[in-house]
Amino acid sequence: ERRVVVVGAGMAGVQTAVALREQGFTGTVTLIGAEPHQPYDRPPLSKAVLLGTAEGSAFDIDFEALGITLRLGCEALGVRPAEHVLDTSEGPVPYDVLVLATGAEPIRLPGTEGVPGVHLLRTLDDAERLRPVLARQHDVVVVGAGWIGAEFATAAREAGCAVTVVEAADRPLAGALPDEVAAPMTTWYADAGAVLRTHARVERVEPGGPGEPGHVVVLDDGSRLPAGAVVVGIGARPATAWLAGSGIGLGAQGEVLADDRLRASVPDVHAVGDCASFPSGRYGERLLVHHWDNALQGPRTVAADIIGAVGGEAVAAYDPVPYFWSEQFGRFVQYAGHHTDADATLWRGDPSGPAWTVCWLREGRMVALLAVGRPRDLAQGKRLIQAGATMDPRLLADPAKPLKAA
Ligand code: FAD
């Protein structure tokens, strides 16, 4: 009986275990996770769970009925690929096939490790620590105007907190979107009653003095921002430090370098979700995707490859059109595809209005689009990207016309 061991009980790990059963795998499946909680979904953590409108976000999956053995509160510490052994906090675990799905860890603000009142937002425990901050309507300073920072600021404003977001770059989402696309989003903060300070670098976080709230965020220009709580959302990196020395090939950001069937560089090891990058045939470059849909789609390829290796069937390369969404400041933002600075942008609708779309074109084909409040554009656009369709820029620019190929 083949033994598959999956490390990381987040979306990618859970979906891998489930996909193995759905695709008929009959060996043993063990799902190992460091967190003590029943496996749960992360997107609600910055939305309903934070606001207390949902209690939790545990996956509605009957692991026992599926014959999946859960080992929670168990941390993987290393792999010995030659011996096919995973070392964990509970001792060695032998495997025939190992799946790495350890996700990502938020980047900490230097000097704030372990400082109470300085929060991250990645885990259920983080969200539970932040709930009372919202419930008590503390003044909050959010460090980083990325996806997480924007979603947290949205929830905190909804709860009635005073919110200041400090961002080192000149605009929100500077790492993800070009200036012309991110610029219109700047006003979303003010519209929601949050203060956005760009070009603002945090120098340190100090304990508040007499009469001041718990913390003071000190910027490099000397300004002092008092805060009941500080929330840091400055990015995440693959949770792979424990693989150092294993011989498993890692990339520049620490991600597991997987191939187009999500196999790592040593035999019988796969990697999927936020912890792994893969070569995209569609985009001609390696992609490291930190979004939910990738942790849903990738596992199907992993399961097929594990099972196919027995049947000898060819498994299709993993080559998705990446997709994600974000709910911020009352808007539904969706993105599909992948763009680079070299791609041309084309607008559908007025970015100062409530609903608009921007498309990225490369040699006449659409490679990506971002839709704000236009889910139909997203659905149609994603299909056109998938098909590699050639677009007519004049048709595309008319938001009253459906998105379709030239
Ligand atoms: P993870 O969900 O990080 O799961 C990995 C698991 O592995 C963790 O439970 C971790 O504890 C465990 N682990 C790590 N190291 C070890 C170890 N050594 N041993 C054992 N276990 C280990 N994406 C969207 O597309 N839209 C959204 O709106 C959205 N909202 C989000 C909101 C928040 C607050 C967060 C944090 C993320 C959000 N995302 C969103 C991103 C999405 O949740 C992630 O892409 C997805 O969770 C990745 O799944 P994963 O299984 O690869 O990693």
Image (cartoon, helix red, strand yellow):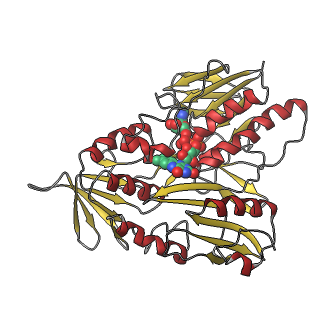
Across and down, in percent, residue 168 comes to: 40, 69
Given residues 49 and 343, the one toward you in this image is: 49
Q: In this view, does 252 lie to the left or right of 268?
A: left
Classify 299 as above or below 253.
above
* Residue 230 makes an appearance in the image: yes
Across and down, in percent, residue 53 comes to: 39, 40
Residue located at (50% from left, 52% from top): 236
Q: Most extreme residue toward the bottom, as rendered?
A: 394
Residue located at (66% from left, 68% from top): 339
* Position of the C terminus by quadrant: bottom right
* Residue 115 makes an appearance in the image: no
Across and down, in percent, residue 55 comes to: 41, 34
Classify 374 as above or below 103.
below
Residue located at (23% from left, 45% from top): 136
Where residue 350 sits, quadrant-wise, is bottom right
Classify 255 as above or below 39.
below
Q: Most extreme residue toward the front, as rendered?
A: 400
Q: In this view, does 12 lie to the left or right of 163?
A: right
Across and down, in percent, residue 71 comes to: 55, 23
Ligand 1 is in which quadrant of the figure?
top right
Given residues 37 and 356, the one toward you in this image is: 356
* Position of the N terminus by quadrant: top right
Where residue 162 sits, quadrant-wise, is bottom left
